Structure formats: structure tokens, C-alpha cells
């Protein structure tokens, strides 16, 4: 196998792994409990908030926020329609409380 063929095989392996991850994520986001958990995780990670404190706590909070941003990126990349659904579900939960 020459280098070009090896690269094609490697690219195919990576592409298959990405497709599996996308399908797994889409399957997961069909489950209401999973959407609620992901919403809770993004809230805990303060994805839509500033993390600046003016001291060393900022670094910790930014690390936590980075995890939340990865979750948000996966949602928007793989199942963007799930984000809108999550927002609506979260609003209903708050109204019921």
C-alpha cells in the first residue's frame, strides 16, 4: 500500500468514526431525559454567561465553561433542531415550577 492509499484508508476510518458519533448523538438527543440533562449541564457550565471574576476563579470557571461549549457545539453541529426543542422544554419546566 502506498502513502496515498494509506491516507485514503485513514480518512475513511476517521469519517466513519465521525458519522458514528453524529448518529449516536442524534439518537441520544431524541430522548427527553437526555435533552434535559444536556440543558442542565450547559447551565451548570455557564455556557451563556461571563466567567470573569477578576481573580484566579476565572480560570476554573473558564475550564468548566469550555466543557459546556463543547456540548453546545456538538448539539449545534449534529442536532441543531434539538437546541430549539431544549429551549422550549426548559421554558415549560420553569413555568410549571
Image (cartoon, rainbow, N blue to C red):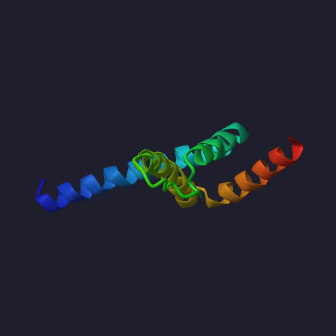
- The residue positioned 78% from the left and 55% from the top of the image is 88
Report the residue that reaches farthest toward the top.
33
Number of numbered discs: 0
Residue placed furthest toward the right:
96
Image quadrant of residue 87?
bottom right
Residue 73 position in % (x across, y down): 51, 57
Residue closest to the eye, 16 or 47? 47
Residue that appears at 39% across and 47% down? 56
Task: Give x and y (percent) for residue 34.
Answer: 65, 39
* Quadrant location of the C terminus in the rendered image: top right
x and y percentages locating residue 27 in the rendered image? 61, 44
Residue at the left extreme of this rendering:
2
Q: Quadrant of residue 80?
A: bottom right
Q: Position of residue 50 (x, y in %)?
A: 54, 58
- The residue at 47%/45% (across/down) is 64
73 left or right, relative to 43: left
Task: Please tell me which residue lies in front, 97 or 28.
Answer: 97
Of the pair 24 and 10, the residue shown nearer to us: 24
Q: Is residue 88 left or right of residue 14?
A: right
Amino acid at each position: 500500500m502506498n502513502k496515498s492509499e494509506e491516507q485514503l484508508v485513514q480518512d475513511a476510518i476517521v469519517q466513519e468514526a465521525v458519522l458514528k458519533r453524529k448518529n449516536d448523538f442524534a439518537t441520544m438527543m431524541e430522548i427527553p431525559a437526555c435533552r434535559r440533562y444536556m440543558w442542565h449541564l450547559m447551565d451548570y457550565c455557564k455556557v451563556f454567561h461571563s466567567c470573569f471574576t477578576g481573580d484566579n476563579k476565572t480560570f476554573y470557571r473558564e475550564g468548566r465553561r469550555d466543557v459546556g461549549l463543547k456540548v453546545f457545539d456538538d448539539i449545534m453541529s449534529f442536532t441543531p433542531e434539538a437546541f430549539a426543542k431544549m429551549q422550549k422544554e426548559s421554558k415549560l419546566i420553569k413555568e410549571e415550577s
